[in-house]
Image: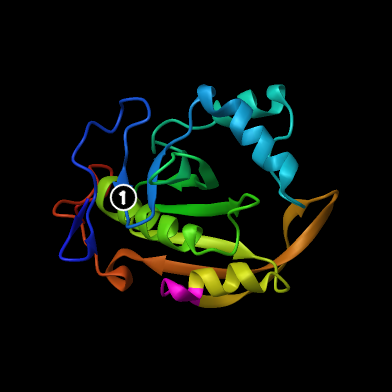
Amino acid sequence: MIENGEIEPAKQTAGAPNVDLGRSPRVALRRITSHDQDEFLEGVRASVNLNLPATPEAFQAFINRFDEGRSAEGLLVCLGDTGAIAGNVNINSIIRGRFQSGSLGYAAFVPYAGRGYMSEGLGLVLRHAFEELRLHRLEAQIRPENQASIKLVQRHGFRYEGYSPDLLFINGAWRGHGRWALTNDMFGVVPTAPHPTLPNH
């Protein structure tokens, strides 16, 4: 929903299938489901060097990790007019208690990469994470040579917090990554009430 040119979260039941979790001028955000398998796998095959499932079995294992934001959230950035999947964003490794943090992973599918859809979609993800999931902090681990990804998080105000050697196991080896982070107050969204798992002292 757009009011006065600003992104507004959709006012619908979060658990319903294919319900928008938010809309921007060109994209909508929703949770991934098993019904997305064929289109998702087609997007992975059409794209290059995506660390995403490429078989039906791998896809089912992939979506079974997601539990609507309790420990992980699997989201799709879709074109607002056609519903086509432009890319995906995962909020992984959600830790509650005093941390209230999650780790972002994302990818754009051909032919939609480089058109700004993921930037709009990430803005919706951040609002969902900070308002609905009531997280305090999101992190993105990015390879230094991945300049497109670095520019994407910079556009949304992420700060660089340093480089960690051998951080993630990718393509058969441990790879170093830069660590980028954003908190809800940096984004300008503070939930009306803290998550119930946050200690009161």
Quarter holding residue 136: bottom left
Residue 31 sits inside the magenta stretch: no
Residue depicted at 57% across the width and 53% down the height: 106
Query: Up-down: is 116 above or below 162?
Result: above
Secondary structure found at label 1 = strand
> Which residue reaches farthest right?
172
Look at the image and tell me in which quarter the C terminus lies: bottom left
Name the residue carrying label 1: 23
Q: Position of residue 98 (x, y in %)?
A: 34, 54
Quick one: 179 or 109, which is closer to the camera?
Answer: 109
> Which residue reaches farthest front?
81
Residue depicted at 46% across the width and 41% down the height: 75
Left or right, 29 with respect to 116, comes to left
Query: Up-down: is 121 above or below 154?
Result: above
Q: Position of residue 47 (x, y in %)?
A: 72, 49
Residue depicted at 60% across the width and 27% down the height: 37
Q: Check disc 1 and give the amino acid type.
A: Arg
Quick one: 138 or 63, which is closer to the camera?
Answer: 63
Residue 158 sits inside the magenta stretch: yes
Give the extent of the magenta segment: 154-159
Callout 1: few (<14), some (14-19), or many (20+) C-alpha neighbours within 10 Å?
many
Q: Position of residue 55 (x, y in %)?
A: 74, 28
Quarter holding residue 43: top right
